[in-house]
Image (cartoon, rainbow, N blue to C red):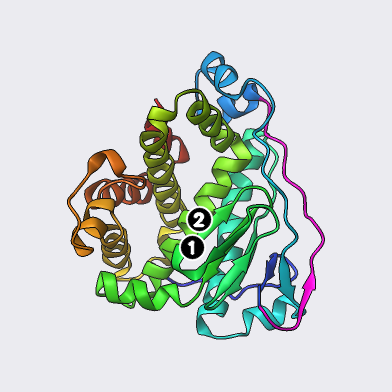
Amino acid sequence: MRLDRHDTSNIKVRSSSAGRARKAGGIGIVGILIALAAAWFLDLDPRQTIGMVEGAQQAIPQRAGETSDMSEAEVCAMGPYASEACDALGSLNATWEPVFARAGARFEQPILDLYRGGQVTTQGCGSASSAAGPFYCPADMGIYIDTGFYDQLAQMSGTGGDFARLYVIAHEYGHHIQNLTGIADAVRQAKARNPSRANSLQVRMELQADCYAGVWAGLNRDRIEPGDMQEGMSAASSIGDDTLMARAGRRIEPENFTHGTSAQRVAALRMGMETGDHTACDSYFE
């Protein structure tokens, strides 16, 4: 996929590291959008949305994170993966901000935290090892990616193409969209009220994030190159719950799925790419 070179004055990026670290100030959590605004943006039933987000937002313990002293430019220059991720972040921001503007909804950029190996300490969601894979922390609006995961993904999917990597960051950005619109908080409230539905609700969250990743690609289809779509589909298929369970030699247990099957993930990404319409992703919560 052809991406413009990032402008470090227009993206928020940092790198967590064990060395040369300093305590980073808390960024603070974005308050959820009012229920009616979220309903308008996502074409949801306002009464249902209000019911799901009623009450205060679930508290998330805050912890100070450690970040390197490198500037954004230095972080983006750490290597090819870092530079590519920064380019992708710039494109994602430029794609999604106008969508929010047209809906009259507040937009705020996420922070991309790039690190490699070891353990990362977020500013709002505690610590995680690189084994956890890429993730999004709603408390500090941070996308955390161990760039070493890209090598693992290439082995699992059988492709080292750039779009497989771009799909990963676009998926995590999808969780940021869910955070800004209030969907993430609504789902957290629903899980708390009905724990037996926690896994199925999480699957819907992940598939919607896959769909949002596809929407980004669909809105930039003029930059798609031959082979990109197949790279993305292969990556999505390689990290389906059923495929990962089978690869680990485990019995396939649908009741323990948290991200969806390979077929579901491929279908979600394809729907977003083919429609280029974020409202198509609402179907996961209808």
Q: Is residue 19 above or below residue 180?
A: below
Q: Which residue is mark 2?
A: 172
> Left or right: where does residue 259 sit relative to residue 37?
left
Amino acid on which the number 2 mark rests in the picture: Glu
- Residue drawn at 58 percent across, 64 percent down: 89
> Cβ–Cβ below 8 Å for labels 1 and 2?
yes
The x, y position of residue 107, in whole percent, is 68, 45
The answer to which of marks 1 and 2 sits earlier in the sequence is: 1
Residue 97 in percent (x, y) is at 63, 49
| Segment colored magenta | 18-34
Q: CA distance from mark 1 to mark 2?
A: 7 Å
Q: Was residue 8 drawn as part of the magenta stretch in this picture?
A: no
Q: Residue at x 79, y 56 (%)?
A: 26
**Under tag 2, what secondary structure?**
helix
Left or right: where 111 falls relative to 226: right
Q: How many marks?
A: 2
Pointer 1: what residue? Answer: 134
